[in-house]
Amino acid sequence: MATNFSGNAHPWARTIFQAKLEGYRLAMPEHEYVNIKVEIEGDVGLLFFNRPTALNALSSSLMRELVDALTRFEENEKIRCIIITGSDKVFSAGADIKEMSTWNSVEALKQGNLERFDSLRKITKPIIAALSGYALGGGLELAMACDIIVAAEGTKLGQPEINIGVFPGAGGTQRLTRAVGKFKSMDMILTGNTITADEALNRGLVSRVVANELYLSEAKKLAHEIAMKAPLAVKLAKQSILKSFDSPLSEGLEFEHRNFYLIMSSEDKQEGMRAFMEKRKPVYSGR
Ligand code: CAA
């Protein structure tokens, strides 16, 4: 069944099925969103930034659409992994400078865009950021709010906000520092200089670097691989890893151990271990 992404009736009249790829790809009606595009490929939800003339700058309306689409992906039981990407030319050049240039503190607070970045934390399914071209400012901050980052080798990553008289405000000072450490984070944020994908990989800022033409196919391959695992185990593993950013080791270990005891009662644990012993592939139900 097609998911209604508009929030309005009537999805059936507008939903377009396309027999592409392995014959199971579903393309959502393109006019539902203006600043993003969404597609579903089997058990993977794909979200593309779609503001080419503004280098996918993250305007308020784009961020609203992003949160809406992610929420619908989260609610769709068939989707087990999510990819956020841009175009070959640019992942995102950051928050929309033209929009922000007219705001004072009160207007910025009213817009609440920074909280929209935080809403990624509520998504329990794994989110892969697939980067190409530029991942700058809020673009890099959004990628860092995802769970896995796949980057094309030509990607330039950076926090250039200091060059326009501000500094990273969508998690950059916190997540970049946790990823690369104090000294590289200070260097990047205080100079605004970019780094290459290879340097980002060496410093633990991205998960994988691939040839330019492969970044999206690699992200899809990875997403489908994760989507085949037991969903509850994936969810609890993600939660447990994220807990390590918010808590001392003892609390994190306790959280992990409880989640592990919890997963022992899942049907998929029985299936996974039985399949191992019977020397066959497991078939997971998500229970
Ligand atoms: N916001 C709004 N518009 C943007 C934009 C942004 N972040 N980045 C690029 N654009 C627009 C440009 O204004 C230009 O529009 P016009 O054609 O109407 O003039 C168009 O996109 C193409 O950009 P360029 O001509 O600059 O393209 P380029 O190839 O010469 O340079 C670039 C590419 C190096 C990425 C350059 O565009 C750039 O430096 N962009 C800004 C990067 C930046 O400072 N990001 C941080 C934003 S602040 C932030 O993110 C705050 C936060 O933490 C939440």
Image: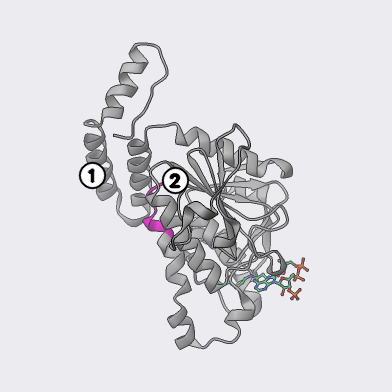
Left or right of residue 266: residue 190: right
Q: Which one is in front, 26 or 124?
A: 26
Q: Considering only order in the chain, which callout, 2 or 1, is on the residue closer to the N terminus?
A: 2
Question: At numbered mark 2, what does the secondary structure look like: helix, strand or loop?
Answer: loop
Residue 56, compared with residue 244, is above or below; it is below
Q: Quadrant of the N terminus?
A: top left
Instruction: Say whether mark 2 is within 8 Å of ligand 1.
Output: no
Residue 172 visible in rendering = no
Question: At numbered mark 1, what does the secondary structure look like: helix, strand or loop?
Answer: helix
* Magenta highlight on residue 128: no
Which percent across, then down, holds residue 246? 34, 56
Magenta-tinted stretch: 120-126
Which percent across, then down, holds residue 221? 58, 35
Which percent across, then down, holds residue 142? 52, 60
Residue 266 visible in rendering = yes
Three-letter amino acid code at the position of disc 1: Glu
- Residue at figure coordinates x 48%, y 73% from the top left: 113
The residue pinned by badge 1 equals 254
Residue farthest along the front direction in this orientation: 13
Q: Which mark is residue 126?
A: 2
Q: Quadrant of residue 258?
A: top left
Left or right of residue 82: residue 263: left
**Callout in the foreground (1, 2):** 2
Which percent across, then down, holds residue 86? 63, 56
Residue 14, compared with residue 17, is above or below; it is below
Q: Within the displayed image, which quadrant is ligand 1 positioned in?
A: bottom right
- Residue at figure coordinates x 39%, y 22% from the top left: 282
